């Protein structure tokens, strides 16, 4: 089932997107998916809510997430999962808004594995998880 993603784009940018799509002979969806996959953003550092010192962004150690599917608790290790860590007090903090979305996507991955009769993954690389399927 397809859902729609709506974005407000100026006529200036919309015309250039259409031009690029036509130039490369791509469908709009493919151009958008390729563009999002190519984007390399930077995770912002935050201030520690406990000691108010600046945190660093880290992806180590791997992050363990428990998801519930059909009443079963399933442990999945997520590697390369970015989060903020305070070097002063040692506190570790997830990036606001990411944890809930990660949980939803992990549930989708487990359900997809079950439906396609594939083994449920016990480890998932976050960098692969955020890539769109083209």
Image (tube, rainbow, N blue to C red):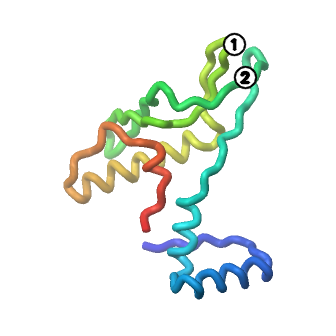
- Residue 123 in the image, given as x and y percentages of width and height: 34, 38
**Image quarter hosting the N terminus:** bottom left
| Residue farthest along the front direction in this orientation | 23
Question: Which residue is rendered at x = 35% and y = 44% of the image?
Answer: 69
Could you tell me how far apart the alpha carbons at marks 2 and 1 are, in whole angstroms?
A: 9 Å
Proximity of marks 2 and 1: CB atoms separated by less than 8 Å: yes
Question: Which residue is rendered at x = 75% and y = 15% of the image?
Answer: 51
Q: Of residues 108 and 38, which is closer to you in this image? A: 38
- Residue 29 in the image, given as x and y percentages of width and height: 53, 76
Sequence-first tag of 2 and 1: 2
Classify 10 Å Cα crowding around label 2: few (below 14), some (14-19), many (20 and above). many
Residue at numbered disc 1 = 88
- Quarter of the image where one finds residue 45: top right
Question: Which residue is rendered at x = 63% and y = 18% of the image?
Answer: 91
Residue at numbered disc 2 = 48
Q: Of residues 41 and 89, which is closer to you in this image? A: 41
- Residue 95 in the image, given as x and y percentages of width and height: 63, 37
Between circles 2 and 1, the one closer to the viewer is 1
Residue 46 badge = none
| Residue farthest along the top direction in this orientation | 89
């Amino acid at each position: 089932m397809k859902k729609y993603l709506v974005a407000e784009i100026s006529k200036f940018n919309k015309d250039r997107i259409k031009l690029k799509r036509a130039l490369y002979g791509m469908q709009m969806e493919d151009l958008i998916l390729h563009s999002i996959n190519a984007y390399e953003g930077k995770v912002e550092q935050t201030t520690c809510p406990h000691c108010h010192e600046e945190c660093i962004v880290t992806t180590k150690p791997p992050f363990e997430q428990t998801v519930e599917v059909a009443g079963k608790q399933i442990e999945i290790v997520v590697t390369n999962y970015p989060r903020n860590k305070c070097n002063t007090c040692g506190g570790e903090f997830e990036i606001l808004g990411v944890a809930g979305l990660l949980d939803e996507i992990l549930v989708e991955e487990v359900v997809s594995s079950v439906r396609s009769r594939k083994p449920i993954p016990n480890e998932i690389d976050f960098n692969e998880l955020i890539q769109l399927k083209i």
